[in-house]
Image (spheres, helix red, strand yellow):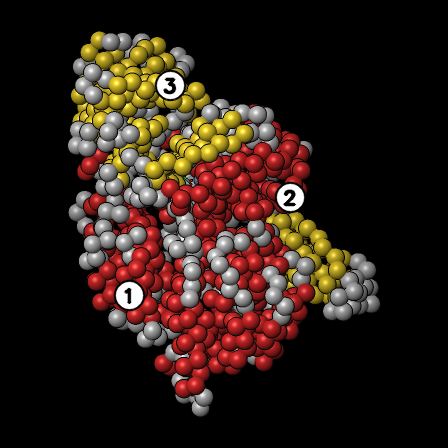
């Protein structure tokens, strides 16, 4: 198995300037003719190495003369003794119908589509499949025009002709040189939703969404989101769209969320289709954000692309940051930030602490698909955000302008990006660059001292990063730390941006009144674990008074983390302090304002977030404690929760912030209330009465709902609490709407989160439904990712049944779709973090996977690293 290293990077020996592709589509035997114009770079006699596999080679011509003198390996075609400039023609034959890996050209529910990032183009033809080879693409598609009325590729349409045999031949030309990972082809019979957008400089752009028949109206929100994204990028970064047409195709079989192919985005239908009956508020949010993300790639990714795949964060970290800023501008910056922080604290911290730890710019890779990670994407976005914080809005914009001025049309590195930020602002970012080469989550320890006599306040910050599995260095990083000092009487408030560069530094503030409290790391200004000893009263003070909403939420999170820790130490759940319950009462009774944020303040941290705070995860203690806390809240605050629920008005569904807040807060109340009547707590005197009232509330919430968000709220609450009413309602959902794949997925994910052993029977059932397909990644994820992530009780069962189930599915899927298998296996990789009994159980499963014959590189890399 061939590991690739960043240190081995060499510029391409040949460049391909243009490529003309002709596809004659056929489900089992598509013929592809590729004619490239290639030239040697520099004075050398190196051979031309072309990547390719998984197809049949039908012939090669050099300057129109058949070529027979070549070497072919499993993965490459080697051509020697070439002239300095030449035309190469290669004809290959592919089998899209049997392509279950969903890379290269494949069939998705009867439509042809492609996925070429990272290294899928090599499954179509022999080519220099690397991002630093930029060519101008022309694409001809030949197919039966009746079955496939839509024949699409990148760029602008240049010809559409009827051939003598009745077939149609459609031609596309993309004037912007691009790497082959941005190539796309789609052929199918879709419903079309059309609009147009006029850019700031007056260019008219046709917008076209292609969706399955009958789904046209479900693409309206995505289309409107696209227009908002186009306008925002003009206003925020002065970036306009550059082709005459922008197309989005929604497909059902897709390994990822979406793909930014030039002018022809391909989307997982889950991130395009929405109406109130099928999509939740969270789905609407995600659609807008992903539509934005892929659109923003047109500049950060496509116009300026990556030199090599180790630089993936150049486009992904930056584009995630851009989509986060966009979402913040469309809604609430605080809530968007909370969302991003949750991702970092769960999945990213886990990755950094596990066997796959890597810097945002990895240094070695076996299978590139394994590095489309929360580290590269989300920690990458945090690293961009820190530059934004250090330079300020205007300074960051200057850096972006210089970046595009220098590198438009080029394939560059993360260093090039930082250099542009540095040069545009005359700053020295050499130490900052360590963020690109060090893996691991820094711990930031905070201590403070107040000297009332001198009226000074001293804050001492200390950073430390534990060793990580990749062995990368651990030098002090540049940490921007937002700070607010607030006096207890609120008469004094000062905000500061501290920049920690040493291992340990003290910052002294003068003329500070007595009794100030420090809000450290406001806005989560650096992706670190904050360690501070701080009393419950002070945390409650911060939760009530910090200027930054994120800091208020974070204080509540820390309160719960501290209580869980006390419970773990005491080996039984502690009682929730009265002052915290009082805070809950107050929040539940406050005026109807900023409800979504209120719901966040009232929510407990999840199992994953808490788990990341322990080197060795006390699974059972955390689960028991969370359960106890939910039930304590439920039984102590039944009246307040019910009142809060009842005073929130329900209106006909609209995706609009006031309503989203109402739904979220009602859902939170229902979640707790359901716990009040879950089997384990019905022991109080008034339980019977409460039980009827609450059951009715839950049922009505479902039955009177005009939208999926509310329905899901009841279902989630009922399933989590193990209530009997869950099953009939789930059945109702399935019978009414289960024919829709997106609803089927929601139904399945709800089923598999049932926290009792019955879930295994349910899972066996689900995979036998006609709607389920092992070849569809959305279906598989809706069952098995949901099970391993949202059902910690059953996934982490002490008898190992959860681990065994996941491992067996991963082993099975690896044969058909390695990329999907390698994603599903993730929760098993961190086995060393669990107790000895669980370690053994997981290790055994991983060992079996490792020994499975024909294991893919994708799965091998992860399993082998985990076991090493
Ligand atoms: N480049 C895609 C995205 O993140 C993933 N393949 O948008
Ligand atoms: Zn992306």
> 750 and 102: which one is in front?
750
Mark 3–mark 1 distance (CA, rounded to whole Å):
51 Å
Circle 1 packing at 10 Å, graded few (<14), some (14-19), many (20+), is few
548 lies left or right of 713: right
Mark 3 Cβ and ligand 1 under 8 Å apart? no
Circle 3 packing at 10 Å, graded few (<14), some (14-19), many (20+), is few
Q: Residue at x 32, y 62 (%)?
A: 733
Image height of 630 relative to 124, above or below: below
Mark 1 Cβ and ligand 1 under 8 Å apart? no
Please tell me in which quadrant of the rendered image residue 805 appears. bottom left
Image height of 21 relative to 181, above or below: above
134 lies left or right of 320: left
> 36 and 454: which one is in front?
36
For the residue labelled by badge 2, is the local secondary structure a helix, a strand or a loop? Answer: helix
Q: Quadrant of the N terminus?
A: top left
- Mark 2 / mark 3, whichever is N-terminal: 3
Image height of 34 relative to 550, above or below: above
Mark 1 touching mark 2, by CB under 8 A? no
- Mark 3 / mark 1, whichever is N-terminal: 3
Image height of 439 relative to 93, above or below: below
Circle 2 packing at 10 Å, graded few (<14), some (14-19), many (20+), is many
Q: Position of residue 619 (x, y in %)?
A: 38, 69
- Depth check, mark 2 against mark 3: the one in front is 3
Q: Residue at x 45, y 88 (%)?
A: 686
For the residue labelled by badge 3, is the local secondary structure a helix, a strand or a loop? Answer: strand
Q: Residue 731 carries which label?
A: 1
Q: Mark 3 points at which residue?
A: 158
Q: Where is residue 338 in the image (x, y as percent from the top left)?
A: 54, 56
Mark 3 touching mark 1, by CB under 8 A? no
């Amino acid at each position: 198995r061939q590991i690739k290293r960043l240190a081995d990077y060499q510029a391409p020996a040949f460049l391909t300037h243009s490529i003309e592709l002709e596809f004659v589509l056929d489900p089992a035997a598509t013929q592809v003719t590729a004619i490239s114009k290639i030239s040697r770079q520099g004075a050398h006699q190196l051979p031309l190495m072309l990547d390719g596999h998984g197809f049949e080679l039908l012939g090669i011509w050099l300057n129109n003369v058949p070529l027979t003198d070549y070497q072919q390996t499993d993965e490459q075609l080697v051509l020697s003794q070439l002239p300095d400039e030449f035309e190469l023609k290669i004809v290959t034959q592919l089998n899209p119908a049997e392509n279950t890996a969903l890379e290269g050209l494949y069939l998705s529910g009867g439509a042809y589509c492609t996925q070429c990032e990272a290294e899928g183009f090599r499954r179509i033809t022999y080519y220099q499949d690397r991002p630093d080879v930029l060519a101008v693409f022309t694409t001809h598609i030949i197919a039966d025009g009746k079955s496939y009325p839509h024949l699409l590729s990148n760029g602008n349409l240049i010809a559409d002709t009827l051939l003598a045999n009745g077939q149609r031949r459609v031609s596309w030309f993309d004037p912007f040189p691009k790497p082959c990972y941005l190539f796309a082809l789609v052929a199918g019979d879709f419903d079309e939703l059309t609009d147009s957008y006029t850019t700031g400089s007056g260019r008219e752009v046709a917008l076209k969404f292609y969706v399955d028949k009958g789904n046209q109206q479900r693409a309206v929100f995505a289309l409107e989101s696209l227009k908002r994204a186009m306008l925002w990028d003009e206003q925020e970064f002065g970036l306009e769209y550059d082709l005459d047409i922008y197309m989005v195709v929604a497909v059902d079989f897709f390994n990822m969320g979406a793909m930014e192919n030039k002018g022809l985005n391909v989307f997982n239908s889950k991130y395009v289709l929405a109406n109130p009956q099928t999509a939740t508020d969270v789905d609407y949010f995600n659609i807008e954000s992903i539509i934005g993300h892929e659109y923003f790639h047109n500049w950060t990714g496509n116009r300026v692309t990556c030199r090599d795949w180790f630089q993936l964060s150049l486009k992904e970290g930056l584009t995630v940051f851009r989509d986060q800023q966009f979402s913040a501008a469309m809604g609430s910056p605080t809530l968007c930030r909370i969302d991003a922080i949750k991702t970092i604290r769960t999945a990213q911290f886990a990755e950094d602490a596990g066997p796959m730890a890597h810097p945002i710019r990895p240094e070695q890779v076996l299978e590139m698909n394994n590095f489309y990670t929360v580290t590269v994407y989300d920690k990458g976005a945090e690293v961009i955000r820190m530059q934004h914080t250090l330079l300020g809005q205007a300074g960051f914009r200057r850096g972006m302008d210089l970046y595009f001025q220098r590198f438009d049309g080029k394939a560059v590195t993360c260093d090039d990006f930082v250099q542009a930020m540095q040069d545009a602002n005359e700053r020295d970012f050499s130490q900052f660059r360590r963020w690109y080469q060090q893996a691991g989550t820094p711990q930031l320890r905070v201590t403070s001292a107040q000297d009332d006599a001198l009226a000074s306040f001293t804050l001492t910050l200390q950073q430390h990063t534990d060793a990580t599995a990749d062995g990368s260095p651990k030098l002090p990083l540049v940490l921007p730390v937002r700070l607010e000092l607030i006096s207890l009487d609120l008469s004094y408030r000062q905000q500061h941006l501290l920049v920690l560069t040493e291992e340990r530094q003290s910052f002294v503030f003068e003329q500070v009144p007595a009794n100030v409290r420090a809000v450290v790391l406001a806005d989560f200004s650096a992706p670190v674990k904050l360690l501070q000893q701080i009393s419950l009263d002070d945390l409650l003070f911060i939760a009530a008074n910090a200027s930054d909403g994120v800091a208020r939420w974070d204080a509540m999170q820390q309160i719960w983390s501290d209580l869980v820790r006390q419970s773990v130490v005491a080996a039984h759940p502690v009682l929730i302090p009265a002052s915290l319950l009082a805070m809950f009462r107050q929040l539940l009774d406050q005026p109807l304002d900023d409800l979504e944020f209120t719901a966040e303040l009232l929510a407990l941290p999840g199992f994953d977030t808490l788990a990341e705070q322990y080197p060795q995860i006390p699974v059972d203690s955390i689960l028991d404690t969370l359960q106890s806390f939910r039930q304590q809240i439920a039984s102590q605050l039944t009246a307040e929760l019910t009142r809060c629920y009842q005073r929130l008005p329900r209106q006909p569904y609209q995706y609009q912030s006031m309503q989203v807040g109402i739904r979220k807060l009602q859902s939170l109340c229902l979640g707790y209330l359901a716990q009040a009547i879950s089997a384990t707590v019905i022991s109080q005197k008034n339980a019977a009465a409460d039980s009827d009232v609450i059951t009715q509330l839950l049922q009505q919430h479902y039955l009177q709902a005009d939208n999926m968000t509310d329905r899901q709220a009841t279902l989630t609450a009922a399933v989590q609490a193990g209530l009997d009413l869950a099953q009939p309602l789930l059945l109702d959902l399935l019978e009414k709407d289960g024919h829709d794949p997106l609803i089927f997925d929601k139904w399945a994910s709800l089923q598999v989160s049932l926290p009792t052993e019955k879930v295994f029977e349910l899972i066996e059932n689900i995979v036998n439904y006609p709607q389920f397909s092992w070849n569809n990644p959305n279906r598989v994820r809706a069952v098995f990712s949901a099970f391993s992530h949202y059902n910690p009780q059953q996934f982490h069962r002490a008898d190992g049944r959860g681990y065994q189930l996941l491992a067996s599915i991963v082993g099975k899927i690896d044969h058909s779709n390695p990329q999907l298998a390698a994603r599903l296996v993730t929760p098993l990789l961190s086995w060393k973090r669990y107790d000895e009994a669980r370690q053994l159980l997981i290790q055994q499963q991983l060992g079996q996977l490792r020994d499975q014959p024909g294991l893919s590189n994708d799965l091998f890399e992860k399993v082998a690293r985990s076991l090493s």
